[in-house]
């Protein structure tokens, strides 16, 4: 069963069109392309180029950006954020998580924060919040009866430093439903060590 089918199982209506995943858009090489995009972002955190090299790299990247812009499609048809076979659905703006389990009990994901996500000595708190928001989207998508749920608020308590470059485990689940309000909880662990936990309120809205 794909993650989309699992997420669909508890709903009384279909997933919104934009949330139905696929594993073909962008072709079989799309995952490697996104991985290279992530590598560019990672590498950019560790360079201090001279002016000549900075200008050369800018020219190289400009050519790549132009090639991508020339093949742009409407966002609802884009491969990024739709490929359920790829980490973080192939969305390079998200930390690259893999869904381990998804169902009425919530979502469990493995996440490796990388150089791009570095704050000072550990993962940047905003990236941890971003991960929780996205995973809460998965958890609530499973529990709303129709449409989807939007974040009203999301609070993160940072309990200990969150390392980069090693697999961590996140769990996010809907604790309580009160009409359109979904109260969501989450945890992020490095082995047995709690790195962060999250409390959020999501509100069910019709599909836009
Ligand atoms: C498998 C595929 C996966 C695919 C997975 C994809 C995952 C993507 C996940 C991304 C999720 C996001 O980031 S979403 C983007 C970030 N969020 C947003 O931009 C939301 C912007 N805000 C809004 O649109 C709105 O304010 C809403 C929808 C949140 C609420 O507006 P509304 O629908 O008019 O509801 P409203 O009447 O105001 O409130 C309903 C009830 O909630 C309460 N309430 C509302 N906001 C708050 C609040 N901040 N704090 C406390 N309580 C609140 C109200 O008091 C009320 O309680 P009572 O009187 O009924 O008791």
Image: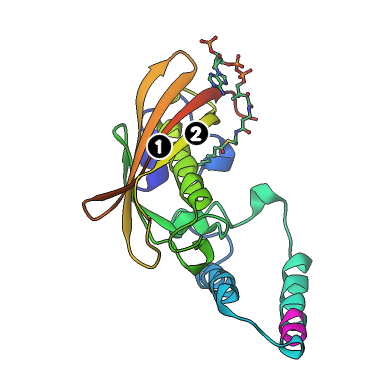
Is residue 190 shown left or right of residue 142?
left
Can residue 57 be seen at all in this image of the molecule? yes
Residue highlighted by disc 2? 154
Image height of 71 relative to 76, above or below: below
Foreground: 184 or 147?
184
Residue at figure coordinates x 76%, y 78% from the top left? 63
Magenta highlight range: 54-58
Picture layout, residue 173 above or below residue 190: above
Query: SS at mark 1?
Result: strand
Q: Residue under circle 1?
A: 198
For ligand 1, which image quadrant applies?
A: top right
Residue 182: where, in percent of width, then height? 44, 23
Above/below status of 60 relative to 136: below
| Magenta stretch encompasses residue 56 | yes
Direction from residue 185 to residue 59 in the image, left or right: right
Q: Quadrant of the C terminus?
A: top right
């Amino acid at each position: 069963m794909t993650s989309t089918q699992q997420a669909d199982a508890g709903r009384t209506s279909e997933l919104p069109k934009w949330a139905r995943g696929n594993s073909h858009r962008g072709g079989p090489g799309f995952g490697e392309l996104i991985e290279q995009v992530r590598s560019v972002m990672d590498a950019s955190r560790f360079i201090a180029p001279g002016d000549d090299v900075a200008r050369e790299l800018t020219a190289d990247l400009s050519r790549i950006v132009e090639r991508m812009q020339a093949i742009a499609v409407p966002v609802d048809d884009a491969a990024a954020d739709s490929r359920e076979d790829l980490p973080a659905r192939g969305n390079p703006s998200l930390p690259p998580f893999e869904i381990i389990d998804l169902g009425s009990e919530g979502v469990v994901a493995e996440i490796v924060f990388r150089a791009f996500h570095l704050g000072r000595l550990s993962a940047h708190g905003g990236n941890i919040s971003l991960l929780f928001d996205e995973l809460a989207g998965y958890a609530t998508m499973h529990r709303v009866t129709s449409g989807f749920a939007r974040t009203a608020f999301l609070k993160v308590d940072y309990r200990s430093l969150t390392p980069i470059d090693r697999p961590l485990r996140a769990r996010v689940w809907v604790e309580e439903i009160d009409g359109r309000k979904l109260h969501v909880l989450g945890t992020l662990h490095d082995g047995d060590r709690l790195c962060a936990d999250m409390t959020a309120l999501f509100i069910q809205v019709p599909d836009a």
